[in-house]
Amino acid sequence: MKKILITGGAGFIGFHLAKSLAVNKDNKIVIVDNLQRGKMDDDFNGLLNNENVEFINGDLTSIDFYKSLDKDFEHIYHLAAVNGTKWFYKMPEEVLRINTISLFNILEWIKGFDKKPKLLFTSSNEAYAGALSAFDQLPLPTPENVPLVVEDTYNPRWTYGGTKLIGELFVIYYSKAFNIPAVIVRPHNFYGPRAGFDHVIPEMSKRIIDKQEPFDIFGADESRTFCYIDDAVEAMVMLMDSQKTDVGIAETIHIGNTDEITMENLAKKFFKIAGWQPVEYKINQGLQGSVKRRLADISKIEKMVGWKPKTNLDDGLSKTFEWYKNYYQNFSK
Ligand SMILES: NC(=O)c1ccc[n+]([C@@H]2O[C@H](COP(=O)([O-])OP(=O)(O)OC[C@H]3O[C@@H](n4cnc5c(N)ncnc54)[C@H](O)[C@@H]3O)[C@@H](O)[C@H]2O)c1
């Protein structure tokens, strides 16, 4: 039996990761989440029906909480964090406290294990997003080794990116000092069912379901890439299962897709999938500070473990749209 801990497992990525790992009955999955954002909805309750999945409602910022946990995990996926732009503005001090202290507590906890578990830490493309505008010479696709930048300490938006930046440093140097095998991943726009309600794809789904007229498109000529959640989960598991992450330095690895699409074309693709077209759409400015193009270099993960995204955007968007349509028709009232 392989024991796997997933922190933040009631959230978007953690839920899909746990669901995928639970298929193998030789895995025993323990999910820790304090439901700050994750929800006990039908999907999550369905996951908990698996005999090999256990849920513990706990706060990772509390040192005392760790006393109740087993010490024989082989893999720890540390995904718990305050995520979602509105929280960066609403409670930046809490973003700093929760994201940093929970990671610090986990590292302090596992450094004392006789047999060290392997740790995966989810950083973010926000750790280097500031560098894209601070140095407009950055290469595209952007590799992992560009400078990490907090563009403006007085703009609360950067608290989240700041916690990912310091988090990467913590993981690299605790891994080195205490021989903890570890890997740092930077997710780039994962999407799929049950992805919350803030990101561009869930938000666009809602306005399509509401048949918004005229339909707003923000930053129409800005391009982004989107990585379907099943592909993302596969990438994380491949990295954790690979012998290449057993020893040595904690590598930092991008997970994302390289198919770029502009916001205008994303909306048009969505209209086709939904079978609805607005009479008129309105082009609006992108959000302040948002860059024209973001494209991650994902050649490192391909070289390391042979992973490449498989799901095309049409298929991923169709599955995602179905989930949101069902949610808004049946559960959101
Ligand atoms: N979704 C993406 O595309 C994306 C992009 C970049 C980085 N990430 C990172 O990946 C990780 C997972 O992202 P997600 O999209 O699933 O986010 P999410 O918000 O859906 O999940 C995070 C979970 O952590 C839980 N949590 C927060 N504070 C906690 C605490 N103190 N104790 C226990 N649980 C706590 C929340 O309740 C939530 O369920 C995060 O670290 C996030 O920063 C995600």
Image: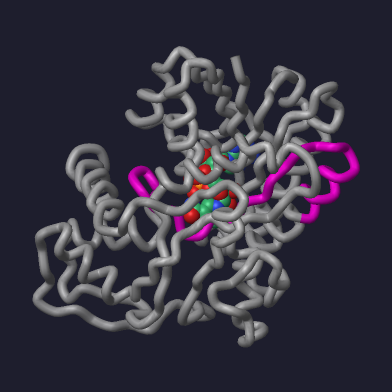
Give yes or no for residue 7 being in the magenta stretch.
no
Q: Nearer the viewer, residue 18 or 253?
A: 253
Which range of residues does the magenta coloring cover? 169-196
Residue at the image point whose x is 33% and y is 74% from the top: 263
98 relative to 273, above or below: above
215 relative to 111, above or below: below
Residue at the image point whose x is 28% and y is 76% from the top: 264
**In the rendered view, does 175 fall on the left or right side of 142?**
right
Q: Quadrant of the C terminus?
A: top left
**In the rendered view, does 305 fall on the left or right side of 151?**
left
Q: Nearer the viewer, residue 256 or 105?
A: 256
109 relative to 230, above or below: above
Q: Nearer the viewer, residue 193 or 254?
A: 254
Give x and y (percent) for residue 64: 77, 26
Residue at the image point whose x is 67% and y is 50% from the top: 184
Q: Which image quadrant for residue 4?
A: top right
Give x and y (percent) for residue 265: 27, 74
Residue, far bottom = 136
Q: Quadrant of the N terminus?
A: top right
Residue at the image point whose x is 53% and y is 22% from the top: 55
